[in-house]
Amino acid sequence: MRKLVLKMSMSLDGFVGAANGGMEWMFKSRSPEGMAWTVDKISGAGLHIMGSRTFQDMAGWWPKATDDFAAPMNEIPKAVFSRSGKLGESTQALQDAARHSGDPQNAHSLHARTWAEAEVIGGDLKTGIERLTKQDGKFILAHGGASFAQSLIATGLIDEYQLLIFPVALGAGLPIFSRLNAPLSLKLTEHKIFASGVTAHVYQPA
């Protein structure tokens, strides 16, 4: 068995994106120590999972990236959840191009292939997650998308929440806890304050 971890960045008032989906509000508060903490958490995963929209955005960006996040984002296996069990045409084209990308010694080609080889999982989300968590290996790290995060939370299967809280209030935006049928009780297992004012909170179900 392996645990399921949801990692999200949030505003003080609980939004993971502005009302228009924008993420610009995060950039002013980034710090080397905060980035190092996040890279360390990401690097411990055995599988990245995400919804199809996030997958499309990430697959178009990370193979070309060179920052500290690039290695764990590119090298760790991925799975993408799609209600239809298929990817959109643009994402499928991206995967096909990556599969046939040129020089096998080229780092960009190798990284693109790890995204091209992502497992596509359709059908019921909870069933798919339960199958993955029953496998052996390091923990599963989920990336959202507010909608995908909401759906994951609704399954009741998340073992740990890694939340980076940024010192900004948006007033309105995209929440992830809005589909709860009952209050969700959590216990704080790790807390870290960075010089930028960002705080890391790690919670597990109480």
Image: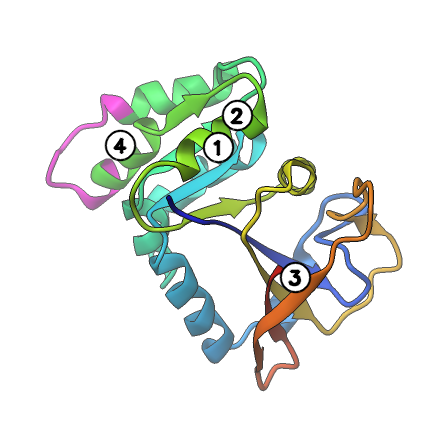
Q: Nearer the viewer, mark 3 or mark 2?
A: 3
**Amino acid on which the number 2 mark rests in the picture:** Thr
Residue, far front: 206
**Amino acid on which the number 4 mark rests in the picture:** Arg
Q: Nearer the viewer, mark 3 or mark 4?
A: 3
Q: Nearer the viewer, mark 4 or mark 1?
A: 1
| Image quarter of residue 112 | top left
- Cα separation, mark 3 vs mark 2, equals 23 Å
Q: Which residue is mark 4?
A: 113
**Amino acid on which the number 1 mark rests in the picture:** Glu
What residue is rendered at 33% in x and 37% in y?
A: 135
**Which dot marks residue 206?**
3
Q: What SS does tag 1 mark?
A: helix
- Cα separation, mark 4 vs mark 2, equals 27 Å
Left or right: residue 87 compared with residue 200? left
Q: Are marks 3 and 2 in contact (CB under 8 Å)?
A: no
Q: Are marks 1 and 2 in contact (CB under 8 Å)?
A: yes
Query: N-terminal of the two: label 3 or label 1?
Result: 1
